[in-house]
Amino acid sequence: MADAIGSYDAGGISDAAAVARTLAGDREAYRVLVERHSNYVYRLAYRMTGNPHDAEEVVQEAFLRGYQKLQQFAGNANFATWVYRIAANYAIDRLRQRKNDESRREAPPRAAEGEPEIDSLSQVKDPAPSPERLAGSAQIAVKMREALDTLTPAERTAIVMRHWDGCGIEEIAAVLKSNSSAAKNTVFRAVQKLRLALKPFAESRGAARAVGTES
Amino acid sequence: MKHSTEEELFAYREGEMKGRGAIAAHLHDCGECRAELDRIEEVFQALNTIEVPDPGEEYGARVWRQIANRLPERRASWWEGLFMPRRLMALGAAAALLLLAFWAGRISKPMAGAGDIADAGKVRERVLVIAVGEHLGKSEMVLVELSNAQPAVRGNKLINISAEQKRAQILVEENRLYRQTALSSGDTAMASTLDELERVLLDVANSPDEVTPAQFESIQKRIAGQGILLKVRVVQQELRAESEGRKPAPAQNDLTPKARNKV
């Protein structure tokens, strides 16, 4: 059987064939899947965790879990989508763990009485820098990273899956283990929070433009 | 004028269909809501400024090195791969035909005497003959399509054979079942033809979705080289003749006609 495709290099076989071979005991066939999809999974993992170290751990764990659960893989699904979902699930657990650890280490920030939950997000790290310093997309990226860190794990997962990977609401709901209406709300809440976090920056840029210190 | 809410504008941006017409009409007339929509859009543009560091081309190989030793041993079980949902459908169809064959044999004459048993055997055999004939017909079609294809490709442009590949994957599973049935019923000649067919189908099933012209040509050569199309056609003719009763149905281990051997 192996000779049948011997004329192709290992990377040339389809995902379905690689899965079938792995299930048949050919561990090397799984290497094809790992090498083919690692970068794709890494992008998701990095956006969810925000740092390369955690992202790499998520990728490794996703492929390890994928191997262990390969019998459950629905053959009519796409392997990339399947391992992506495993990575998202693991990343969200990891984010939750990280949030818990952080909240144990630091005293929780005290919200003003009667202040809506959403306002806590305006507490973006660092006071607003000067307009000059904030010029350019690099600064926006910094602000957005900080804003993403303030999202709950579910919100972060939802916005990453929706915005960067174009996932459908049903798919997001499956990862969040909620229904589609709740998943839609989670995406919206994430956008609201990011918008609020970006607001002081957007205003300062507007002010900078108004006084001519920024183009 | 009642302005759209932030949530409505967000849903509109997300392509939500509910109330879309009304919001579009409102946006046309309302500069304030258009500006609000632009501000929502700015959030997404800002998200796009976050870049993901490139882990490098060799990243996949690195991940493999990191996890390879941690992968648990998987006991080889050739059948495990068969029990994937899509394949189960194909197997189900083939298995249903086999069951039908045995069921037909059982119910044809409940009070079985010697002649009745012979009748039951014939009914069973006929159902099997039809099922295998159909399977061979479908296999032939895939192989003919691949053999006759002359894709208009320039240079090294890839040729998409995913449709044939998917059909071949299903046929491989069916084929395996028929081959095992033929083998267990002592029809080694039929089992041998099905075995050859299975190898060719596997070639196609395990090929990449897209192949280079050279790879495509290699597939065509392998189909032609093994003469499998001719063998399949000969067997099909025999089975057809059998099912039409043009000659007495041979015993199962007689399904080795001279013509097939000649091929």
Image: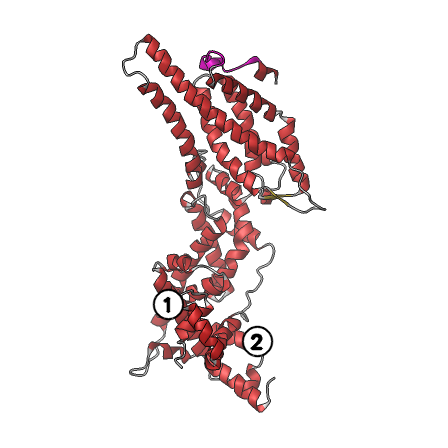
Location of residue A99 by image quarter: bottom left
Q: Is residue B205 left or right of residue B116?
A: right
Based on the picture, tell me whether residue B251 belongs to the magenta stretch: yes
Q: Which secondary structure type mostly characterizes the magenta part of the structure? A: loop
Residue A154 in the image, given as x and y percentages of width and height:
38, 65
Mark 2 belongs to which subunit?
A: A
> How far is the residue under mark 1 from the one under mark 2?
28 Å
Magenta range: B246-258
> Which amino acid, by three-letter code, is at mark 1?
Asn
Residue B162 in percent (x, y) is at 56, 42
Q: Position of residue B39 (x, y in %)?
A: 48, 77
Residue drawn at x 42%, y 67% as measured from the top left: A156
Q: How is the image coloured?
A: secondary structure
Residue matched to label 1? A185
List the single residue furthest toward the right. B155
* Chain letter of disc 1 in the image: A
Few, some or many residues within 10 Å of mark 2 (<14, 14–19, 20+): some
Q: Nearer the viewer, residue B78 or B259?
A: B259
Q: Is residue B178 above or below residue B262?
A: below
Say which mark, if any, is on residue A137.
2
